[in-house]
Amino acid sequence: MSGGISRLDREILKKLEVYRILRVNVTPDLLTSSIPLEREIILSALDRLVDSGYVDETYRLTQYGRRLIRVGLIGGVFDILHPGHIATLEAAKARVDLLSVVVARDRTVFLNKRRMPLNNEGFRLKMVSSLKPVDVAILGSVEDFMEPVRLIKPDVIFLGYDQSLPKQVSKELDMNGVSIEKLEIEVPGIKSSMLLRKVLDLLGY
């Protein structure tokens, strides 16, 4: 992860980047309400980041500020959360300052798996957003896989042990300086497909 700045400075940069990804207009009040420190301390640090050229007057990271944090992206369906998901997310988070998650849309799941997910996209997004390793989660795009990638602008994309990317997508990521890291983490005996089969069996399907 990136170094050279204080823990508070990094936390402010992360918060500002999360708000940008969520398309939220940032105000000092919003920022101070999201960090459990005295308001004056946070505002002083924010002013310092602006004066240093790391944050602009609209409270967005400049290109220099963005270089101070490493942003990772990982995607998935996350229909039935299990220890394998948690282990993978924790491993990804350990490698970056800010971990973003793209949750597959219901229609994307249907197109790829020929079935609808048990939990709808809104519920799945809420579950993933509540997990400790996750800094920000958004829904993916049915039409354009790269749309959320362009929004988040990650430094690295993590793939689970059973995930892969089309060659053309990998080529585009490489051209934009985005690295790809495979996380070979698998909890024995636990897979989403196995858990789903058990649930369907219990329901008599």
Image (cartoon, rainbow, N blue to C red):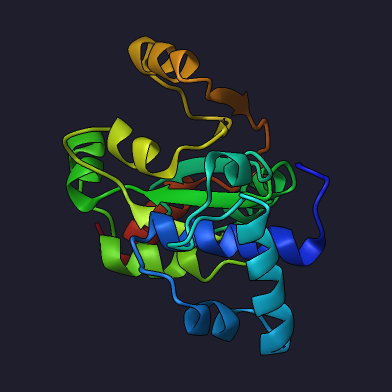
Left or right, 154 with reference to 83: left
- Please give the count of numbered marks on the rendered protein: 0
Instruction: Determine the image quadrant of residue 187.
Output: top right
Give whichever of 46, 86 is nearer the camera: 46
> Can you say whether 191 is above or below 135 in the image?
above
> Does the image show residue 79?
no
**Residue 21 rendering spot, x and y as whole percentages:** 40, 54
Q: Is residue 117 above or below residue 1?
A: below
On screen, residue 180 above or below 119: above
Measuring from the top left, give residue 92's x and y in whole percent. 66, 43
Between 189 and 90, the residue placed more toward the observer is 90
Relative to 10, 167 lies left or right: left
At 62% from the left and 27% from the top, the residue drawn is 182
Image spot of residue 185 (x, y percent):
68, 37
Q: Nearer the viewer, residue 137 or 33?
A: 33
The structure residue drawn at horizontal position 43% and vertical position 71%, both measured from the top left corner, is 26
Q: Nearer the viewer, residue 149 or 13?
A: 13
What is the quadrant of the C terminus in the image? bottom left
Q: Position of residue 20 (x, y in %)?
A: 41, 57
Q: State the residue at coordinates (37%, 63%).
A: 125
Write the residue at 60% across / 59% down: 50
Q: Please state if 14 lies on the left or on the right of 77 as rendered.
A: right
